[in-house]
Every structure is written in C-alpha cells, then in structure tokens.
Image (spheres, helix red, strand yellow):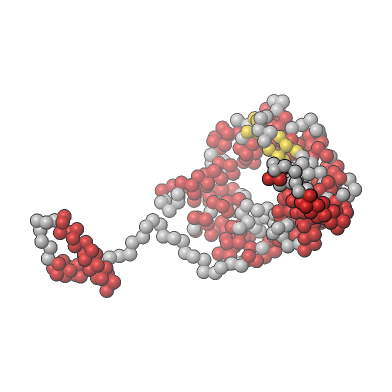
Amino acid sequence: MTRIVLAIMVGLFCCGPALNSSAQTRKIDSPEVLKRLLAMPAPTPRHAGTPAPPQVAETRSPQFYSRDQTPPDDAPIEDLIDYWLRWVDGDREPSEAVSKRLLEAFINDPKLLPPFLDLLPQDDSTKTKIKNIYDKAQLDPQFDQDWRDKLRKWLVFNSTYFLDELLTMARKAKDNQRDGHVEKEEALSALARVSWTNAEPLLRGLMASGQPRATALALSLFYEHAIEEKDLSSEERYRRDLQAIAVNRNQPGYARNVAIESLSLTEWAGVEDWYLSLFQDESLLDVSDGEYSLSPFDALFSSDLEKWIPIMARLVESKDINVRSAAALCLVTVDDEEATAREALTPLLPWLTNPAWINDSDNLRMRLIQALGSIKIPESVPGLIWARAVAVFCKPPRSLMNSGPRSPTKRRTKRRLVATALKIFPSSQ
C-alpha cells in the first residue's frame, strides 16, 4: 500500500504542471485529492492477454528423453506427455497402455492434444472422442483457430465425419509429371483407409488411366488392402505387379519408390532377401522424379535401426561398389542419438580418405564430414585432417586464381602437405 501511495505522489508531482496548464480555470486542492485517493481501495493486479502456462518445476536432463529411457506404462502422466512430445515426429510409438492414458489425459485437458493425435489409439472410439472434443471447442475461447484446424484436418483424414470433403479431394488425384508426384496422394491414401467402398472405384480408374505414378500408388493401396483382408491370391498378384515396377528402370522414380516402400514395409516370406537384392541395382542409388530426390531403401532401414545398422555395417565391406554404396547411403542418413549415430557412422570412416569408395552423386560424403563434427569418434580424426588438407590445398583459393602465378613457396607448401597426407593414407590414391 505504501508503494501505491508513493507512486501516486510522484505521479502528481510530475504531472502537476500539465494539470495546471490544461485546466487553468480550476484550481486543484492537492491535500483533498490525496485524501480521496488514499480512501480508495488498492487496484487489483492486471494481466495482458492469457496468463503464461506454469513453468515445469523440474528441468529434464537429456537422458530423460533417450530412446533407451522410455518411461514405464505406469509413469506419472506428466512424464509421459513430456517424453512423448519429443518423439511425436519420430519413428516410435508408445505402448497401447500409454496411448490410452494419453487419450484420457487429453479428454480432461485437450490444450496439448494436436501434436499427439497420431500417437493415440487408432480405433473408432478414439475418433468419436476427438470429434466430441472438437465440437465442444468451437465456442471455447481458450482454443485458437490453429488448434481447431489441426483437429479438423485429423478428423478429415482419419474418420468419416467429413467424408464428402475427403472424397472431393481424392477425386482430384492424378500424376504431376513436372514435379514428379501424385497430386492429392494423402487424400487418396486416407480414403482407402477410412472408406474402401468409396476408394475402390477411384483406384481402379487410376490403374486404367495410363498414369504410371498414380497406377503404382493405386496398386500399393490394393496390395495393402488385400493384406488387411487376408486375401492371399490378390496379395500375391499385386506383389508381383509392384516387384515388376520396382526393378523397371523405365518407370518414373516416384513409381519405383512407392513400389519398394510398400513391399519392404509389409511382412511376407523373403521380403528381406528381396530388399537386399535391390542393392545391386546401380539405378536405385540415385532415384529422382521431377524436383524430388528419393531414397527407396530408407523406409525399411529406418523402421528398425537397431536391427539394420549392423547389417549395413557388414555390407559396406562388400566388394560390389553398388552394394557398398547402397548400404553407406543408408548409414550416412542416421541422425539419431549420439550412440546410435556413432554406430552408424563408424563403418563409413574409409570414405573420408577415399572419396571414390562410394558412388555418391548427392555429395553425402560432405554430410558425413559435417556429422563427425558433432559426433565423437576418435578414429575419425586422421581422416578428417586428410579431408581438410585435400579440400584446402588441392583447390587453389579464388584470390590466388585471379592474382597471377602463385609463388614457388606456396606451391612447395601445397605439394608437401598433400604428399604427407598421401603417405599417411595411401588408400586415398
């Protein structure tokens, strides 16, 4: 209260001249004004906008979010929300029990719901609950338009509540030859999941349209539906069609990529052998379509790094440069926790001193060098020094290229450093 009175007195002192100049016809009785102000109740606290959310009382260590430190199913719900929020865009899913606990938590407090939608149980009851949350939020000011739009989009692509809207989008699916993809692919795939009755005639039409990308996508959706329905004869027929697309070099990159991903991510006898046999195909090392660069081997590899990293590590020792390159191009993309990344990148260290060790049209060797700047692999230091020496001294600086003949001293320095690097790492020659 004392601070309020002092603030008022300072304000009156500072504003006195202004008051007198703006109201010269009336003399202000300062003591009387002070008495009235002191008799008034203290002002209530004021806030601008919505109060900030409470701060997390505990600062999490990086180990809390580790792949190997998944909280148990009965962990406090705050721990589960915090942990899985870090993994919503990753390649992992919570257990069934945790999914149900997350759903119940968001029914009570749905503010954090949108990023978790794909981690919740994927059944009809979940869709009903999400729709109820969405409906109740329409007039609730605590939810902004972005929050509502995210829930609505999820309902459009994962339920039949907005089926007409989804169907309208799916009917526009077609090849985009310039950009190298299928327009409205997401809508068509979603329709096949939520309403096969409506999707089937559209897919048959695309298969008869002569559009190679849309045909491959439609075949993959028929194949996945046959597996779901346990229709073995149809499953085998569609698998053969997709295998033919996968190895056909005349097919667009998008079509080959869709075929390989669809086949490699489903379970069937011989899938791993078939997948690895593709590593001998040089044309699959650099797949592109329009403006897109594609990685057909990545889907299965990324689905289980713990299983596939050791397999790829063995394959980079192959005498077949195509097999070696395909395995290396998988390993170099690992951007996971440090221990996992170290396991994936260590087999690639020969690449540092021998750029020709791998067929690399996308300059992924530079990605390896950049990754080794943050991943601690002591064995990589000599190779990084060599790569740096070659990069610096085998390409003259632009200033020297434009300044006439280089001095004999600089030429001798370059020759000595490169010669030293080649003596230390003869495999690079």
In the rendered view, would you say 173 is above or below 314? above
What residue is shown at x 14% (from left), y 67% (from top)? 30
Vertical order, 168 against 347 (above or below)? above
**Residue in the picture at 75% in, 54% down:** 388
Q: Visible in this render: residue 169?
A: yes
Observer able to see residue 259: no
* 412 sits left or right of 12 in the view: right
In the image, what residue occupies the spot 73% across and 49% down? 366
Q: Where is residue 135 drawn, in percent x and y?
A: 47, 47
Q: Farthest residue in the top direction?
A: 209
Q: Nearer the viewer, residue 93 or 131?
A: 93
Give the total number of marks visible in the rendering: 0
Instruction: Indicate the position of residue 307 as horizontal and vertical percent values.
Output: 79, 56
Q: Quadrant of residue 8?
A: bottom left
Q: Is residue 76 above or below residue 110?
A: below
User: Viewed as shown, does residue 152 lie left or right of 415?
Assistant: left
Residue 39 lies left or right of residue 124; in this view the side is left
* In the image, residue 419 above or below residue 2: above
Residue that protrudes farthest toward the right in the picture: 319
x, y percent for residue 285: 79, 41
